[in-house]
Image (cartoon, grey):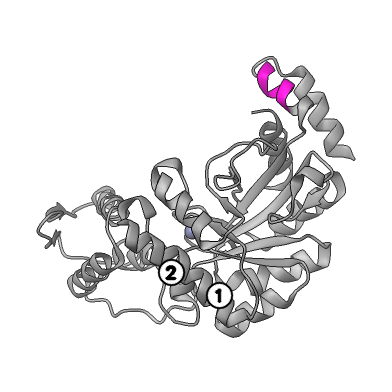
């Protein structure tokens, strides 16, 4: 296997992390990659979309160079080092654009689905914000958010200030629950004079598309909460509901057990010890986080690190992978 040779070669050369080198010798790692979207977008401020062309080349490269494992399987028995592919959120393009490529190349993948937007024309809130704040030609010169705790006024007389409003609202929305977000979105919609969207560009999959995806033998479905809220900002009760209800909803739709989960946003500050305990309680066997790292047999199965993949041409992708093995 070409990459295994690469991996060993670069690991030997690496003087930066002798500890990693040693750990990799004791137990060769699994690297988990996380994707969100496979599609061509005009504007992608979060940089979460990979074009179909780059995605196909990335998958072919992996297929030729490294053992591919499934997220949910027991990696102590897997050929290692190995790579697992995951997707977060549940965008329609996962079924329409990514799945045909996974099938063509023969690559298994796990899709973590946020259930609240499935089968609705609702956008995820960050896309709604892009449409309200970043896309319009003209906007009023200031925006005041009415909220008894987070209330604030932004001036918007330049593109830079517009970006600051967008970043500011994203930051605040990460701190609050779905009810408060919905109230703020109503304020923003009426301020910008923009109708609530029936979006197609950023839509989530329909229930039929989800079933189609789930039926494919290369595919595993996992849960990713109901409303895609930062768990760390929620009470235990609401966290439990978000975690358990997304599992239950998927199981009802698909008629099979859902055994794995991924935390929304997924950095260490975005979930808590309680979230981890609640995942265990809900009956999940593994949960994926979203910070870089390697998976060894001693890694906490409820906080599995993942490497985010950008829209990298295959040469850059190969170079990044070499870094993932050694960093
Ligand atoms: Zn997500």
For disc 1, the marked residue is 250
- Residue 80 percent across, percent down from the top left: 81, 40
Q: Tell whether circle 2 marks a residue whose Cβ is less than 8 angstroms from ligand 1.
A: no
Residue at the extreme right:
1
Residue placed under numbered mark 2 in the picture: 226
Observer-nearest of 3 and 284: 284
Q: Horizontal placement of 305 versus 80: left or right?
A: left
Q: Quadrant of residue 307?
A: top right
* Residue drawn at x 49%, y 78% as measured from the top left: 200
| Residue at 45% in and 71% down | 245
Is residue 202 at all visible to an observer of this figure?
no
Image position, residue 162 (x, y; %): 26, 54
> Label 2, label 1: how many angstroms apart (C-alpha)?
10 Å
Q: Which residue is drawn at 55% across and 81% down?
A: 206
How many residues crowd mark 2 within 10 Å: few (<14), some (14–19), many (20+)?
A: many
The residues colored magenta run 18-23
Helix, strand or loop: magenta stretch: helix
Q: Residue furthest top?
A: 15
Give the residue furthest to the bottom.
208
Residue 261 placement: quadrant: bottom right
SS state under label 1: helix
The quarter of the rendered structure image containing the C terminus is top right
């Amino acid at each position: 296997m070409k990459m295994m040779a690469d991996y060993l070669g670069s690991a030997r050369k690496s003087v930066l992390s002798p500890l990693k080198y040693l750990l990799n010798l004791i137990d060769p790692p699994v690297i988990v990659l996380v994707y969100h979207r496979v599609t061509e977008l005009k504007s992608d401020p979060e940089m979460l979309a990979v074009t179909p062309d780059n995605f196909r080349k990335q998958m072919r490269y992996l297929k030729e160079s490294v053992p591919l494992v499934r997220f949910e399987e027991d990696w102590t028995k897997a050929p290692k080092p190995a790579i697992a592919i995951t997707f977060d959120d549940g965008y329609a393009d996962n079924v329409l654009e990514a799945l045909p490529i996974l099938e063509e190349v023969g690559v298994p993948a796990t899709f973590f689905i946020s259930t609240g937007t499935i089968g609705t024309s609702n956008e995820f809130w960050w896309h709604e914000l892009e449409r309200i704040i970043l896309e319009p030609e003209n906007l009023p010169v200031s925006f005041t958010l009415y909220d008894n705790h987070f209330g604030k006024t932004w001036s918007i007389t330049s593109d830079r200030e517009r970006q600051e409003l967008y970043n500011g609202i994203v930051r605040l929305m990460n701190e609050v629950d779905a009810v408060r977000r919905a109230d703020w979105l109503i304020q923003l919609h009426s301020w910008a004079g923009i109708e609530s969207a029936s979006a197609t560009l950023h839509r989530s999959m329909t229930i039929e598309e989800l079933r189609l995806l789930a039926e494919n033998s290369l595919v595993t479905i996992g849960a990713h909460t109901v409303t895609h809220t930062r768990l760390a900002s929620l009470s235990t009760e609401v966290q439990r509901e978000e975690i358990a209800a997304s599992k239950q909803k998927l199981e009802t739709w698909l008629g099979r057990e859902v055994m794995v989960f991924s935390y929304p946003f997924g950095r260490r500050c975005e979930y808590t010890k309680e979230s981890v305990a609640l995942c265990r309680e809900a009956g999940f066997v593994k949960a994926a986080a979203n910070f870089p790292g390697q998976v060894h047999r001693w890694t906490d199965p409820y906080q599995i690190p993942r490497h985010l993949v950008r829209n990298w041409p295959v040469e850059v992708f190969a170079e990044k992978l070499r870094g993932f093995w050694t960093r």
